[in-house]
Structures are given as C-alpha cells and as structure tokens.
Image: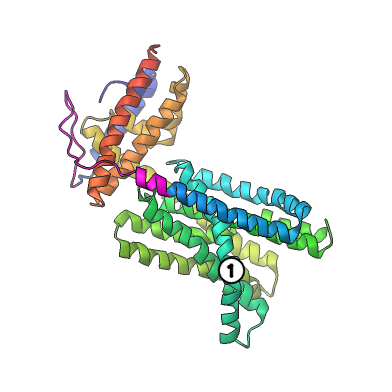
C-alpha cells in the first residue's frame, strides 16, 4: 500500500516524517520471517487456519457472568453487615480511590488499549471472586498460622502473613486465567500490568467499602476515624494493591512473549512471590521505622511508587520501539508508507494523524487504523519468535485485510466521497 493516508497531510509534516522514517529503516534488524509482500496484487495467502476468536470471546462472556454473580453475593454480604445507609455511603467513598486507579491504568494502557470486555472481567474478578476467596479462605489460613506460629501475635499474623498470601493468590489467579483464555489479548508486560492492575483495583474497591464501613460502625457514625481511614487508603495509598499484583502481571507478560506453558506457570509463581513479599512489606513495614507511618510512607513507599512509575514508562517506550521495528518490516514489504510507520509508532504522529482525520469526520476510523496496526505489530512479534504460528499468521492476515478496508474508507472520506 502506498501514497495515501497521512501522506495527504501538509508538505511540512510529510517532509519531516519521510526523513525520520528513512533513518529508522536504515537501522532495521532483519527477522527470520518477513511479512507477506504486496505488489500489484496481493500474494497468495500463506495461512490455512482461521483466527480462533469466537471460543475465547464466548468463554470471556461466561467468565464475566460468573464473576458478576460472585460480586452480587459479596455485595449482599457487605450490605447485610453494614446496613443500607452505610453500604451506600462507603460505596460512594470507595469510588474515589477506584477512579484514581482506573485513570492511572488508562494512562498505562494508552499505547495499545485492551479489549473492554477483558478489562471488565478483570475488574469483576477482583471486586467479586477475589474478595469472596479471601473471605472464605482467610480464616482457615489464619488458623493454620496460629497453629504453626503460636508465639506470634494475631496483629502480626493477620495483616503481615495471612492477608498478603490469600489476597495475592486470589487476585493472581484471575490474571493467570486471562493468559490462557484471552492469549490473543495478552501481548506483553504492559498488558500484564494493565490486567493485573485492573484486578487489584476491583479488589481494593470492595475492600475499601469494608474498611470504611468498619470505621463508620466502630466510631458510631461520621467522624475523625472514618476520615482518617479514607485519607490513608483513598488518598495516600490508592495504588497499593495495584502495585502488588502488577508484579504478577509483569512476570506473566514477559513469559507470554516467549511462550510455553511451563514458563508461564513458573513466571506466575515468581510474580506471586514478589507480590506477596511487597504486600507483607507494605503491611508490616512501619515496624522498621518505629511505627511511624508518615516516615515509612515518605521514605520508603513514595520512592517505590516513583520507581514503579518509571518502570511503566520504560515498558511503554519499549512497546513503542517494538511497534516501530515491526511496522518497518511491513513498510519494506509494501503494506505501509514510511510516513505511516512514523505516524503509527510515535505519539506525536498519532496526534497529528487524528487531527488530520478529525477535519473530515474520520477520527474514529483513524483510531481503528492505529489500533489495528499496533496489534499487527505485536502479532508480528509473536510470529517472529515462533509462537503459535497458525493462529498468529491467521490473525496477521485478517488484520492486513482490515487495514486495507479501513484505509479505503478513510481516503474516501478525505476526498468527500460517501
């Protein structure tokens, strides 16, 4: 494909794009399997399989239904414990840290947005099933620790031992399920962080309702205790659970890129160990600074959060570089122009292309073009490492055809045609 799309942008924009894209192609690394060429007519398809999306989608729907039912049961339990008024008030308060977490995860997920249905399941798993597992299994695990460690105080066993182990296992299982059920939507560490973070945000939402309700009941109504708990959990540390469970998603994301069930299971347990350790440190770390939460927060927790944000930024930049590298290969095979590669693989290029498409009412179409091209690059990465070749090659073929149609529609709109 050549000569259209963002090539219709002003000459000044096109000139800088062409120069930059040419430099990128000069440093391109060869890959074992190049994309199919596109000459005067498409070459014969190399794929015998069809994309296997229906089964994963149907299973996702069933999982959403099951997780939603679990959330209803947990909500009924909380309502019965707190009463209608307290349940409603605490639910509204819990929306504040939830909103902060979801906005943060949306920022992480900007480069290659995940399917909403999968994110919805992740949230439901965290808010419903993970909390249910914790409520059911937690007391039994605590009793086991009391028997094994008779000299330890309950104030240590509950928050520092039992809660981190049970909660991280409950949350992590949801992320592991997504690896096997929606493998096509789980492309790497950034995806893992987003899915794990969404599970954790759902868990924290329900847990916050319980904590806020307990503070409300124990103080006999609105007062300083509820305010303190809200500030502590909702303002100072809304991302706590997200940080813990993201270790599981990060480990699974790296394992998924290389493939292999044994590697994925091993990565799950590695990430789980890090998540549990971080959770234990968070819950018991104040003992390291003589019980002062503020000292612990500013000297240890804030730097850890800053380190996590830096890591996410580096992961996103790595994903952008991967997109550029793989789309350069398609440009060499004739599927994109060099200007389009630069448009699709840089944030500035995407903003400029969306502004161009908005001028004639095709912003949504351009978004589809960008999303499909990004997924194409990630699919090509899976092909390059030899992972699940029949399915990924079928997905590649389908995405290339979708990109042809999307480009045709967008160009027609730019020329004023229906």
Position of residue 374 measured from the top left corner of the image (x, y, whole percent): 36, 38
Q: Nearer the viewer, residue 327 or 310?
A: 327
Residue reaching furthest to the bottom: 151
Q: Quadrant of the C terminus?
A: top left
- Which residue is found at the position 78% from the left and 52% from the top? 85
Residue bounds of the magenta highlight: 32-59
The residue positioned 36% from the left and 67% from the top of the image is 266
Quadrant in which the N terminus is drawn: top left
In this rendering, would 259 be left or right of 142?
left
Q: Residue at the location (39% across, 23% down)?
A: 13
Res 237 visible: no
Residue 329 appears in the figure: yes
Color style of the picture? rainbow
User: Residue 42: image x %, image y %?
Assistant: 18, 28
Question: Where is residue 340 shown, x and y percent of the image?
Answer: 33, 29
Mark 1 lies on a secondary structure that is: helix
Q: Tell me the quarter of the picture where residue 138 sits.
A: bottom right
Local packing at callout 1 (Cα closer than 10 Å; few below 14, some 14-19, many 20+) is few
> 100 or 213, which lies in front?
213
Q: Is residue 108 magenta?
A: no
Task: In the displayed orientation, state which residue is furthest to the top.
Answer: 416
Residue for badge 1: 136
Q: How many marks?
A: 1
- Taking depth in this image into account, of 417 and 287 the one nearest to the observer is 417
Vertical side of 363 occupied by 250: above or below:
below
| Vertical placement of residue 260 versus 346, above or below | below
Residue 245 point in image, percent of width and height: 51, 60
Overall secondary structure of the magenta section: loop
Image position of 388 (left or right of 279): left
Q: Residue at x 71, y 48 (%)?
A: 92
Residue 382 as seen in the image, left or right of residue 38? right
């Amino acid at each position: 494909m050549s000569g259209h799309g963002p090539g219709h942008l002003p000459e000044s924009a096109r000139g800088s794009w062409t120069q930059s894209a040419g430099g990128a192609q000069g440093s391109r690394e060869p890959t074992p399997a190049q994309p199919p060429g596109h000459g005067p007519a498409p070459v014969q398809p190399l794929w015998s399989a069809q994309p296997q999306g229906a089964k994963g989608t149907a299973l996702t729907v069933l999982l959403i239904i099951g997780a939603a039912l679990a959330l209803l049961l947990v909500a009924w339990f909380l309502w019965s414990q707190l009463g209608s008024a307290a349940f409603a008030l605490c639910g509204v308060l819990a929306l504040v840290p939830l909103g902060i977490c979801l906005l943060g995860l949306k920022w992480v997920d900007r480069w290659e947005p995940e399917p909403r249905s999968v994110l919805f399941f992740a949230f439901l798993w965290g808010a419903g099933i993970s909390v249910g597992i914790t409520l059911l299994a937690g007391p039994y695990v605590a009793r086991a620790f009391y028997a094994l460690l008779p000299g330890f105080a309950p104030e240590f066993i509950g928050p520092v031992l039992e809660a981190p182990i049970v909660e991280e296992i409950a949350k992590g299982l949801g992320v592991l399920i997504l690896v096997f059920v929606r493998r096509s939507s789980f492309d790497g560490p950034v995806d893992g962080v987003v899915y794990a973070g969404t599970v954790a945000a759902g868990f924290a939402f329900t847990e916050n309702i319980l904590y806020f309700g307990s503070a409300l009941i124990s103080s006999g109504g609105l007062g300083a205790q509820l305010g303190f708990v809200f500030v502590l959990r909702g303002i100072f540390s809304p991302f706590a659970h997200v940080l813990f469970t993201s270790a599981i998603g990060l480990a699974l994301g790296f394992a998924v890129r290389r493939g292999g069930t044994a590697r994925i299971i091993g990565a799950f347990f590695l990430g789980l160990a890090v998540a549990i350790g971080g959770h234990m440190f968070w819950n018991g770390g104040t003992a390291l600074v003589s019980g002062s939460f503020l000292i612990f927060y500013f000297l240890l927790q804030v730097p850890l959060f800053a380190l996590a944000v830096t890591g996410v930024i580096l992961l996103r930049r790595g994903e952008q570089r991967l997109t550029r590298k793989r789309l350069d290969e398609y440009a060499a095979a004739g599927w994109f122009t060099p200007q389009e590669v630069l448009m699709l693989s840089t944030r500035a290029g995407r903003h400029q292309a969306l502004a161009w498409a908005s001028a004639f009412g095709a912003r949504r179409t351009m978004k589809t073009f960008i999303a499909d091209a990004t997924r194409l690059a990630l699919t090509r990465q899976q092909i390059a490492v030899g992972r699940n070749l029949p399915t990924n090659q079928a997905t590649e073929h389908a995405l290339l055809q979708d990109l042809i149609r999307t480009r045709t529609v967008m160009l027609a709109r730019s020329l004023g045609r229906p």
